[in-house]
Amino acid sequence: MRVLTFQVLSFMLEEWKVPVRISIGRADGFTSDHYRTPSPSQETISLRTALGFSSKRPDSTSSSPRTLSKLSAERKDPLAALAREYGGSKRNALLKWCQRKTEGYPNIDITNFSSSWSDGLALCALLHTYLPAHIPYQQLSNQDRKRNLTLAFQAAESVGIKSTLDLNDLMCTDRPDWQSLMQYVAQIYRYFES
């Protein structure tokens, strides 16, 4: 097997706008007249390889069609990736994500998507992790549900997350509809995490 070496031949790389000198010859001293001279495109490929660049994409993007379709599905439904990360259903994965995000906040114990959120503190804590300037969490009380929920909705709306929950409905019950609340929390997740 003959090894080609790079010596001096001048041309300008368009991509890098860097003058580079290269010539192709054999290591054993024979000139390249005895062999077919590579085309400019082959020289460019050889140079990129010699400089440590590759014309191939990194392994993360050159995936099988199955992996690409899975990634496309996860872009459409980011909760699928969350469920895979935490294991179990999308609902339980989202609940675990909420628990992780609000860990260390006082008066927060998220165990479900209903009563755990009724006083508005869980929503405020979750949004405070992303928007601390919008929610003065240390000044909030679990006794002032209306203020907590209003602050949470205003903070979310300030970044474009529209409320799918009705403040009056939440004020009337200690056990809000878990599906509506989960849908709203999922919007928050999608906005900040995907």
Image (cartoon, rainbow, N blue to C red):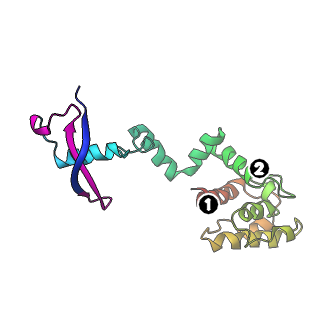
Identify the image quadrant of residue 45: top left
Q: Amino acid at mark 2?
A: Asn
Identify the residue at horizontal 79%, vertical 48% (top origin): 111
* Disc 2 residue crowd, few under 14, some 14–19, many 20+, Cα 10 Å: some
Quadrant where the N terminus sits is top left
Q: Label 2: which residue? A: 112
- Magenta stretch: includes residue 24: yes
Name the one closer to the observer, 107 or 15.
Answer: 15
The x, y position of residue 118, in whole percent, is: 80, 60
Q: Label 1: which residue? A: 192
The x, y position of residue 126, in whole percent, is: 73, 60
Identify the image quadrant of residue 19: bottom left
Q: Is residue 182 left or right of residue 69?
A: right
Hey, which residue is sitting farthest front in the picture?
Answer: 29
Mark 2 and mark 1: Cα distance apart in space: 21 Å
N-terminal of the pair, mark 2 or mark 1, is 2
The x, y position of residue 181, in whole percent, is: 70, 58
Q: Is residue 138 above or below residue 32?
A: below
Quadrant where the C terminus sits is bottom right
Q: How many marks?
A: 2
Magenta span: 12-34
Q: Secondary structure at mark 2?
A: loop
Q: Secondary structure at mark 1?
A: helix
The x, y position of residue 33, in whole percent, is: 10, 38
Camera-near label (2 vs 1) is: 1
Identify the image quadrant of residue 34: top left
Q: Is residue 167 above or below residue 186?
A: below
Name the one closer to the observer, 62 or 194.
Answer: 62
Q: Is residue 35 above or below residue 107?
A: above
Which label number is shown at residue 153? none
